[in-house]
Amino acid sequence: MTRKDKKQAILDTALTLFVSQGFYATSTASIAKKAGVATGTLFHHFPSKDELMNHLFLTIKQEFANEIQAQIKDSGDLKNDAEHLWCSAIQWAMDNPLKQEFFQQYSMSPSIAIEIREQAMNGILGFMGTLLQQGQAQGLLANYPLALMQDNCHGQYLAATRYFLDNPGKWQEPEHKQASFALFWNAMAKG
Amino acid sequence: MTRKDKKQAILDTALTLFVSQGFYATSTASIAKKAGVATGTLFHHFPSKDELMNHLFLTIKQEFANEIQAQIKDSGDLKNDAEHLWCSAIQWAMDNPLKQEFFQQYSMSPSIAIEIREQAMNGILGFMGTLLQQGQAQGLLANYPLALMQDNCHGQYLAATRYFLDNPGKWQEPEHKQASFALFWNAMAKG
Amino acid sequence: MTRKDKKQAILDTALTLFVSQGFYATSTASIAKKAGVATGTLFHHFPSKDELMNHLFLTIKQEFANEIQAQIKDSGDLKNDAEHLWCSAIQWAMDNPLKQEFFQQYSMSPSIAIEIREQAMNGILGFMGTLLQQGQAQGLLANYPLALMQDNCHGQYLAATRYFLDNPGKWQEPEHKQASFALFWNAMAKG
Amino acid sequence: MTRKDKKQAILDTALTLFVSQGFYATSTASIAKKAGVATGTLFHHFPSKDELMNHLFLTIKQEFANEIQAQIKDSGDLKNDAEHLWCSAIQWAMDNPLKQEFFQQYSMSPSIAIEIREQAMNGILGFMGTLLQQGQAQGLLANYPLALMQDNCHGQYLAATRYFLDNPGKWQEPEHKQASFALFWNAMAKG
DNA sequence: AATGAATGAGTTTTCATTCAT
DNA sequence: CATGAATGAAAACTCATTCAT
């Protein structure tokens, strides 16, 4: 196993165990063991357990952000573009259930330092803010306070992924997929 | 201090510390000390730290559920009734910020046994389901899958309380209060 | 339940639990609960857990000693008298398996203060010494050092009761009963 | 101190303390301290206090069994061979008083899991059974039930070592040494 | 870089005993 | 006498982290 492999094995194992057992119930020793490396090796790659967690959190957030931003279009039809984005975001969650679960569990948890969480949130919700403002400028979205709308987007996204992860077959059914976007869009759209 | 007082002091202290420091970062010894009782007393009332947590969780959920259900009306005007309910629920969160914070942190956390979380969710979201169905029957709410709508309600509620707790003054401003309900109502309402 | 009843219930329960779980694995709370009394009540009757143990130990030893001494005969036929005594002693063990088990477990254990154990041993092995000396004087028993013979009697008795308690049916078979006495008698008898 | 040294120091210290204070009165912290290692080190080598005890028990039993089996002869003179074995066994006890004391205290104690005790007993008493059967086949030993004779051997051995450990000088006196064997041999020998 | 034995502070939990009712 | 809530010292055990090899 190469250096990179070991580091990746540690990250993968940590993700799996943090999600299935929780951060505190997962010892660094158990991560190392399951990853097939020595306990000391973990601390060669990450200065502490907390730093491992932060690294994991930021990495996953970045991965998600990259994926989503690549899907941003400007076709002129805002509703269509929004639907594409909404479905892409949920699709990512369906493709990466472990990472989404991780996100659900730790976005609000004190296991991750507050500045790290905020840093991640701003990075991701930042482009959301831009999109919302564009929509308002075009007169397509309601003129509610921006921060409130951003939080609402986030909350609806968490609820939708929760629903589709818990009921995996439903995401394939157009009725459910469309309903999830309709809830979201109607909330945001100008009366 | 009487018997009830001690048990209550333990519960109050645990709530405060679990919210401010997290479940795992809060030792039973620190709870006992801050509550002014001996460590043994905590274990006299609760068989384990986990059971204390479960008790706290179920108690707070019940308190919330009682409060909300008392606010359910049937005036004939569904939208008005829904607004009253929505505002009552957020008002409860503003009146009980510690409990709401607790709810935000631990609703998804592995610190609470999954069966306890589900039991609590079902108890609370149960009446929500009934209300949604009534609205659909009256042709006022959209005919999306019920479970999806329930999860969406929950997600929007969490997002709204997050927003108003983080920006406490906004709840007094009618513009924000109305916007938060509008987002919610438009999501649910029949096109 | 009268006072005497409660005290007896505590003693009976303690005997059962000490034998089945061990002294240290048995909490005073569990004794009290199983005996149907309050935890405080145990400490009204016995100043401490150790004293309860000592009381139990001495009581059972006394009960055994009384039973055996009542069986001492002087028919003129030492071998017959010895056999009667041997069988009586084992019979007591078969009739009181819990007490015999208690004896086996705690005769050597540090759970009982050494002075209590010695006091009990002397009380019981005392009359054994007298009998052995009589047999030696009559030329029927070997002239080995007395203390060695006493310890040997005790060891053979423990071994025999261990065997018959572990194989309860065997005590009814004359072959086994007689063999157990033969082993004992031949060890002691003058060549 | 090397790795092996630390593990051995823990075992040696545990033996001393378990014998002098008893299993339950000996804390793992006191073992570690007296052995000159950290508390964690004890648990690095043994998963629990019980496992440490079991390891100790099986190790000592094995040591004894090895010693004794090395002394088995077949000179053709069974009585001589038996005497040699008997004296070797007691000599081991005299040379290893701590281990013998450990054996006396814990052979019957619930501090050691019953399956561990039985495993040890079978391992050691196994060869005894073979020897007894050979003696019976040669017509030199009485035809009593085998298991009863085995238990009796064990009981007499415990009694003899108890006696000689309590009176250390006596083992040097031929009279006592021979008497102890005579008691044993006469019990077993064919009338 | 990789290893894994060693560390010791910190955690949850137990339990004999007390004492106000 | 009887009760059982309260006590707090002490126990077993965990685990992130270090460091000699």
Image: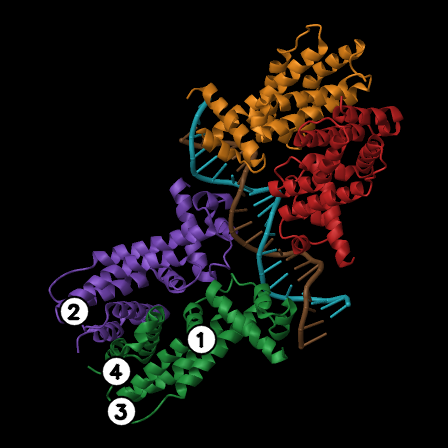
Chain colours: A green, B purple, C orange, D red, E brown, F cyan
Whether tag 2 and tag 1 are in contact, CB under 8 A, the answer is: no
Instruction: Tell me if C138 is positioned left or right of A4 in this view.
Output: right
Q: Nearer the viewer, residue D94 or D44?
A: D94
In the image, residue C56 above or below residue C83:
below
Screen quadrant of the C terminus of chain D: top right
Q: What residue type is disc 1 on?
A: Glu
Residue C121, horizontal then vertical, whole percent:
69, 22
Tag shown at residue A91: none
Q: Give the labeled residue for mark 3.
A: A77
Q: Give the x, y percent position of residue A3.
A: 63, 79
- Precedes in sequence: disc 1 or disc 3: 3
* Label 2 in the same subunit as label 1: no
Mark 3 surroundings within 10 Å by alpha-carbon count, few (fewer than 14), some (14 through 19), many (20 or more): few
Q: Are marks 3 and 2 in contact (CB under 8 Å)?
A: no
Amino acid beneath label 2: Gln
Labelled disc at residue A143: 4
Tag 4: amino acid: Asn
Dot 2 surroundings within 10 Å: few (below 14), some, or many (20 or more)? some
Residue type at mark 3: give it: Asp
The residue that disc 1 covers is A118
Q: Mark 2 against mark 4, which lies toward the viewer?
A: 2
Q: Name the residue at 45% across, 30% down.
A: C38
> Label 2 belongs to which residue?
B136
Q: Establish whether labels 3 and 2 are both on one chain.
A: no
Q: Is residue F1 above or below residue B169?
A: above
In the displayed structure, A28 sits above or below D19; it is below
Q: Is residue B59 visible?
A: yes
Q: Chain of mark 1?
A: A
Q: CA distance from mark 4 to mark 1?
A: 25 Å
Work out how far the residue at label 2 is from the one at label 1, CA to CA, in angstroms.
39 Å
Disc 2: which chain? B
